[in-house]
Image (cartoon, rainbow, N blue to C red):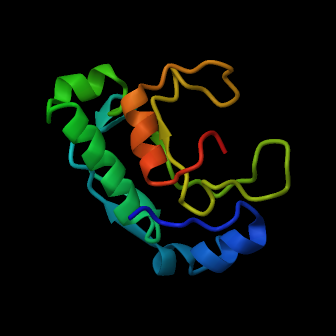
């Protein structure tokens, strides 16, 4: 069953995911996951992704669904852009705001960012990827 995520406000996210402003946030709240298919950052093979431990199993479920829907074919995964990693943890505010980004909580992930930039009216994200994230109740574009 998909995770029920907290409301998308600072107090709810801090209560659920931990406070990224605290010095021990990373050591207490983050783990490294290994995607079930090869992902690349800046065209270099990725060894793992540092994420908030509260999203780890759900994000792995997303990746496993993508792998299954692509017939366990790395070439297909590459073709739909699911192997292009743009980042997850990044302690920063939301652009144009003083509120922390979901990246600061290590609960946002950028996939195929060149073809799906922030603020794009029409991205090129594969329906396979979109559905896998929807199935785990992730929010889009926040």
Q: Nearer the viewer, residue 72 or 19?
A: 72
Question: Is 114 on the left or on the right of 99, as rendered?
Answer: left
Question: Is 84 on the left or on the right of 98, as rendered?
Answer: left
Q: Nearer the viewer, residue 139 or 119?
A: 139
Decide if residue 43 is in sight here.
yes
Pinpoint residue 139: horizontal percent, then vertical percent: 59, 48
The quarter holding residue 96 reads: top right
Question: Is 13 on the left or on the right of 71, as rendered?
Answer: right
Decide if residue 85 is in sight here.
no
Residue furthest toward the front? 1
For the point 50% across and 76% down, which residue is it?
29
The quarter holding residue 58 reads: bottom left
Q: Is residue 142 above or below residue 112?
A: below
For the point 45% across and 29% down, which residue is it?
112
Residue furthest toward the left? 72
For the point 56% across and 21% down, which residue is it?
123
Q: Nearer the viewer, residue 37 or 68?
A: 68
Quadrant that contains the N terminus? bottom left
The quarter holding residue 51 reads: bottom left
Pinpoint residue 66: horizontal percent, then vertical percent: 29, 39
Pinpoint residue 69: horizontal percent, then vertical percent: 24, 35
Pinpoint residue 142: horizontal percent, then vertical percent: 67, 45
């Amino acid at each position: 069953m998909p995770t029920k995520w907290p409301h998308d406000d600072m107090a709810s996210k801090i209560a659920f995911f931990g406070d990224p402003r605290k010095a021990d946030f990373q050591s207490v709240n983050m783990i490294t996951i290994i995607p079930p298919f090869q992902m690349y950052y800046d065209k270099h093979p990725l060894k793992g992704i540092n994420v908030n431990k509260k999203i780890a199993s759900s994000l792995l479920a997303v990746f496993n669904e993508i792998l299954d829907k692509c017939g366990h074919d790395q070439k297909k995964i590459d073709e739909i852009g699911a192997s292009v990693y743009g980042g997850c943890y990044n302690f920063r505010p939301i652009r144009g705001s003083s509120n922390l980004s979901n990246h600061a909580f290590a609960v946002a992930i950028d996939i195929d960012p060149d073809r799906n930039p922030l603020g794009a009216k029409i991205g090129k994200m594969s329906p396979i990827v979109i559905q896998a994230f929807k199935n785990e109740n992730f929010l889009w574009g926040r």
